[in-house]
Structures are given as structure tokens and as C-alpha cells.
Amino acid sequence: MGTKMGPSYACLFVGYLEWQMVNRYQGPTPEFYYRYIDDGIGISTMPLDDLKNYIDFVKTFHPSISFTSEISTSTVNFLHIKISIRDRFLHSSVYYKPTDSHTYLTYTSSHPHSCKRSIPFSQMLRLRRLCQDYIDFREQCLSMRDFFVSCGYPLEVLDDACNRVSKISRTDALIPRPEQSSQRTKLIMTYHPHNLVARKIVLNNLSIFQTDPDAREVFDEPPLVVYRRAKNIRDMLVRSRISASHDSGTRSCRRLRCQNPFSNLALGVGLGVSVLTGFRTSFGRSRSRTE
């Protein structure tokens, strides 16, 4: 799952396994089944023995893939959702895995205040979507507030986020928000607390740009200030200052069909030509300071 292709590949592979399982299994299958990547959830009214036989078939279907299962008549956990049955209806709440450490961004971290204030709001909005019962939502908000207090967040920031989310109904919270695209000119700066002064200077003197005929077309609206992340300790430690050495001279031809071991590429500036096949390829050569 570490690569961008990982989730898509897992979806395709597990979906192919499901298709094979359905075609080969001869007994009854669950009436309701949904899957997200490699996690599935189902509801069935079949006898318990038939359900266990189906699960055993799934677990032994592929020699290299192992499945885990959990059967309950009251509550099951799926991803970050706890689903339970109450009075013959399904109810949902939030579920935290035992390995969840609740380590959020520390409030003293060098990030924009708008970013740090939006994190508690987004997490509590997530609770509003997951918790079907309002009382349960308020209780989970108190627990979430304790998680952020341990990360140094002020109580007024957390209470403000909780009150704002409480005014949103669960129906409105579940409606997907359309993506908003802005045509405003972007002012991109590396974030630093001292750069906030530069932002104020630009916005306070916007009238100067709007009086210029050429600049008026670009700054007809206030620019959208966008911050990029500065280098952190990880970037300084991981990236080495020592560059890899490059061999000088000639190198073998990279053409796959060229079987001649003596066919070489003459090093030039941005272009190499095979002496035997005439195959032309571009490359970039980095010279060290000692060359």
C-alpha cells in the first residue's frame, strides 16, 4: 500500500478473487456484502453453520492470501466505524483501533494558524458524520477534545470547533462538498512566521497594482496566498549532501536489440550516438568538481 498504485492494485486483485469465489462456491452466500479495498462487511440471515462454512471456504481459497473474520449478532467494526443493531435498526458510531495513538499536529508547530485551527474542526466533523446519535456525538467530541488538549491545543479553539460542528446536521454533513476552483492569482511563499508580514504588505498595497493598466489584469482580485512547507529536520537528515559519483568516458549502448558488447556511446553534451547501430539517445551527465 506504500505506492500510489497499491490501493488500485489491491482493489483489482481482491475483486478478481471475489468473482472467482462467487462462481465456485455452491452453498448460500451473504445477502449483503460491501468492500473497501481489502476490508469487507456483510449482513446475513443464514444459519450460523452455513455462514461459517462460507467463511472457511473464503479463508482457504487462495494459498497466499489470508483473511480474518469476526461474527457478531450485535456489533461489528468496519474501518473506523462501529456498527450495531438496536431495535432492529443499524446504528453507527466511531471506532478507534487499539494501535491508534491519536498523535495530531502539535499546536506549537510552525504551521499557519488557519491550518492548526482546521484540524480539530475536521476531526469533529468526521465524528458528526460517523455518529448517528447526537448524544453519542457529543460524548465523542469530549474524548476528541482530550486528545487535542494533550497536543497543546487551547480549550477555546476546541470548544469553538465543537460548537460550529454541532450546528451542522448529520444530513448536511454527509453531503459531499463540490470542489472549488479559484481563478485568483496565487502568491506562493515558503511558510515562516516572519512571512506573515509580507502577506500583509501585499494585501495592504493592492491598490498600487490595480492602478497599473498591465497589473490590473492580473490582480483584479486580491491574490490567494498559498504557503508551501519549509524544510524540516527529516528533510535535512535524510537528504545527503554527498552526490553520487559518475563514471567518465564511454558507456555501453542502451538499445535492447544491440547484441554487440563493444558498441559504445560516445559521451557528449546531451546526446549519445552508438558507433555500431547509430542509435541516438539523450542523457544528462553531471561533472564532479574534481573533473
Image: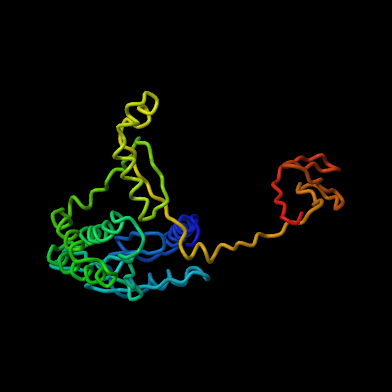
Q: How is the image coloured?
A: rainbow
Relative to 101, does residue 159 appear above or below in the rendering?
A: above
The quadrant holding residue 59 is bottom left
Image location of residue 170, percent across then percent down: 17, 55
Q: Residue at x 74, y 41 (%)?
A: 271
Q: How many marks?
A: 0
Q: Residue at x 37, y 66 (%)?
A: 27
**Which sits in the foreground, 137 or 146?**
146
Q: Residue at x 34, y 38 (%)?
A: 223
**Which sits in the foreground, 31 or 190?**
190
Image location of residue 163, percent across then percent down: 14, 59
Instruction: Pick the quarter of the image with the C terminus.
Output: bottom right
The quadrant holding residue 206 is top left
**Which sits in the foreground, 142 or 18?**
142
Q: Would residue 291 appear left or right of 3 to someone viewing this image?
A: right
Report whether residue 79 is seen: no
Image location of residue 2, percent across then percent down: 49, 62
Q: Would residue 279 appear left or right of 70 to someone viewing this image?
A: right
Image location of residue 33, percent across then percent down: 32, 60
